[in-house]
Image (tube, rainbow, N blue to C red):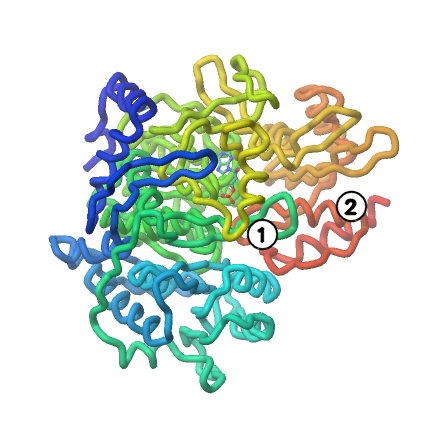
Amino acid sequence: MKSGDKYIPLEKLNSIKKEALENPEKFWGEQAKCLDWNKTWDKVLEWHVPYAKWFINGRLNACYNCVDRHILNNRRNKAAIIWEGENGECRILTYYELYREVNKFANVLQNLGVETGDRVAIYMPMIPEAAIAMLACARIGAIHSVVFSGFSADALAERINDAEAKVLITSDILYRRGKKIDLKGIVDKALLNCPTINHTVYVKRNNDLKLMEGRDYCWDELMKGAKNYVEPVPVEANHPLFILYTSGTTGKPKGVVHSTGGFMVYTTKTLEWTWGINDMDVFWCTADIGWITGHSYVVYAPLACGTTIVMYEGAIDYPNPGRIWEIIEKHGVTILYTAPTAIRMLMMYGEEWVKKYNLSTLRMLGSVGEPINPRAWKWYYEVVGQKRCPICDCYWQTETGGHVIYPPIGIQDIPLKPGSATFPGIGIDADVVDEYGNSLPPNKRGLLVIKNPWPGMLMGLWKNDARYRAAYWERIKNCYCPSDYAIKDEDGYFWILGRADEVLNVAGHRIGTAEVEHVLISHPAVAESAVIGKPDDIKGEVPVAFVVLNKGYQNKKELKEELIHYVKETMGPIATPHMILFVNKLPKTRSGKIMRRILKKLIMGEELGDLSTIEDNTSVDEIRKELSDFK
Ligand code: WT7
């Protein structure tokens, strides 16, 4: 099916949106039929701010919906997971094969003493076993807590302990940029401080894996003796499907809890509305399963839709900048869902790399994680999508479970504006308000809020009610506050401006670091930038910008002055960077988020602390040198 075949008239979309807000119970009750339920709910929604319960007393199993129901029809032999390793190794699991593996592993978990409601930690690379482990947990009603495999031993232990996980599923090594990373070493260190873990299961990829008798097991060994079928446990819709930790404004991570029924309905429906996913699709979301995007749109929603997904272990520009395009051509990917930071990096390598490959299978594109600057949008649209593929800029968060502001290009050909995630999605009553909660007129910057509950909304924070209320519900009364700045333009399009909690205060004026960055990257010389606040005796704080230049631009004093002037002109004198540093690379997490806290510490000459999530250490060394040259 080509894109466009499923389009509905705009009036129809508007009436659906209207109904979803006016009669959410009727609307979501209808939508929930996209899943198979063991028992229908008694009530669609109970809403006592700030807690929503969806599909009360309904019973279902997420794993059944992602796997079992497809093997009962002609998807049985369809590829569920196309896995590719960094070295080009490839594994394909059909839905039937996935079914078999998931059943067996569910039995392995049972044999290790895991019961419904128990927590299981998953610390794994991007290999099919990671998805199998998640689905096996869901099958028996165990709550998984996936910890990104780039986290350090301390971070892993902290998350395991907060959730009091009984079992840890991991792997001995992972492959990244041609290197073997020793996960086992990290796990051993973490487990010194994890009293709740009884057993650890290792996917063995190296020959010399040393296991601790009675505690550690090898995945393959346990699978050998496992039963072929485990009855999926139908859980109440509000039984937690998983916990996923995310960072907040304080140092301690927040354990975001998602439900089974609401989460599954919301992610499945948003996947359909976003790209009109269908059986011809090969869907590649490049996110790691360690993040929410990997939960919602690598594993749960696509598999619930019976889609073929691509899972790739490795860097998308390794061993060469054409890697991502090579994979698209090789597997005939139809929808690519990635992040602006990846797009900017690929753009820097130049379009020659894209042109080497045949990308004619692509029909739609997606962007997520941060606002996409118009230049990157244009490149993505013209060079990657060859002006044929609409781009869905999806705004959402770990907490929202699924897309909340996005163009539903799967069902409607709505005009896009590069850099805008367009409109609040179906069933989302979003607005831009001032600090008192008053709706703002067009083009006024304010806080983004969501005024109603939606099925994908987090259930709360794991065992931390006070923090749940404080983090999301106290800033604006009775509204969910994602802590992002936004404006709504005169056509009602939403433009996300960046986090409302990474703000600078320059001489009494608040400046979003993301806003300054946005201006900088709109300059032709700038590929990427990160802005932080540097303490200043007079102004309180002044912005400092780290800039990665585009190919062909040179590190010259004149260019620095030009950029400073450019920001001053575009944003006003208070936003003027106090200094600009040209660097080759910004320190980033493996999920592509710029680590501003590290830049801040570098500027302040402070100890850097935990660097375990950083993608590439050389960025830090280079900045240190640049700073010492500057002084
Ligand atoms: C924050 C959430 C859920 C996606 C992965 C990140 C920013 C996310 C967009 C977008 C502008 C975006 C926001 C949000 N963000 N998508 N399309 N346009 N900003 O999940 O780690 O929970 O981060 O990412 O600031 O609050 P996350």
Per the model, the C-alpha gap separating discs 1 and 2 is 25 Å
For this view, does 245 lie left or right of residue 519? left
**Position of the N terminus by quadrant:** top left
Question: In the current view of this chain or complex, which residue is farthest to the bottom?
Answer: 213
**The one of 589 and 192 positioned closer to us in this rendering:** 192
Question: In the current view of this chain or complex, which residue is farthest to the left?
Answer: 73
For this view, does 341 lie left or right of residue 55? right
Q: Position of residue 448 (x, y in %)?
A: 52, 27
What residue is at 73 percent from the left and 24 percent from the top? Answer: 509
Q: Position of residue 315 (x, y in %)?
A: 48, 56
Q: Residue 253 bears which disc, if any?
A: 1
How many neighbours does mark 1 have within 10 angstroms: few (below 14), some (14-19), or many (20 or more)?
A: some
* Occupied quadrant, residue 570: top right
What residue is at 57 percent from the left and 44 percent from the top? Answer: 466
Q: Which residue was labeled with disc 2?
A: 603
How many numbered marks appear? 2
Residue kind at label 1, given as amino acid type: Pro
What residue is at 58 percent from the left and 52 percent from the top? Answer: 253
Position above or below: 308 against 577: below
For this view, does 470 lie left or right of residue 37? right
